[in-house]
Amino acid sequence: MNNYVDMVRYGRGADVDKNLAVKYYSKAIEEGNVPEMYNYACMLLAGEGIDKNKKLAISYFKTRFNI
């Protein structure tokens, strides 16, 4: 799934769809895919396909990197 999400996030071989990327990253996190927390946090921090939320982004970064 990660490759497809990157494709829709960046438009590499698929149409850009930031909202869909957010949806898939969120689903991956719900399923226990901790590495995807980084990508989701980056999108939260930038407001990329989702409302900006610096506080939540930092929380995901901390969880992802065990800080």
Image (cartoon, rainbow, N blue to C red):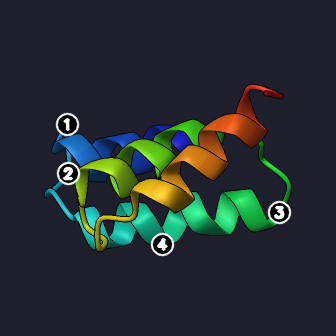
Q: In the rendered image, is residue 24 in sight?
A: yes
Which residue was labeled with disc 4? 23
Is 35 situated above or below 45? Answer: above
Crowding at mark 4 (Cα within 10 Å: few <14, some 14-19, many 20+): some
Which residue was labeled with disc 2? 14
Tell me what residue is drawn at x 30 percent, y 43 percent: 7
Q: Position of residue 33 (x, y in %)?
A: 78, 47
Residue type at mark 3: give it. Glu
Q: Tell me the element at label 1.
A: loop
Crowding at mark 3 (Cα within 10 Å: few <14, some 14-19, many 20+): few
Question: Between disc 4 and disc 1, whose residue precedes?
Answer: 1
Is 26 situated above or below 57? Answer: below
Tell me what residue is drawn at x 34 percent, y 49 percent: 45
Question: Between disc 2 and disc 3, whose residue precedes?
Answer: 2
Which residue was labeled with disc 1? 12
Q: In the rendered image, is residue 35 in sight?
A: no
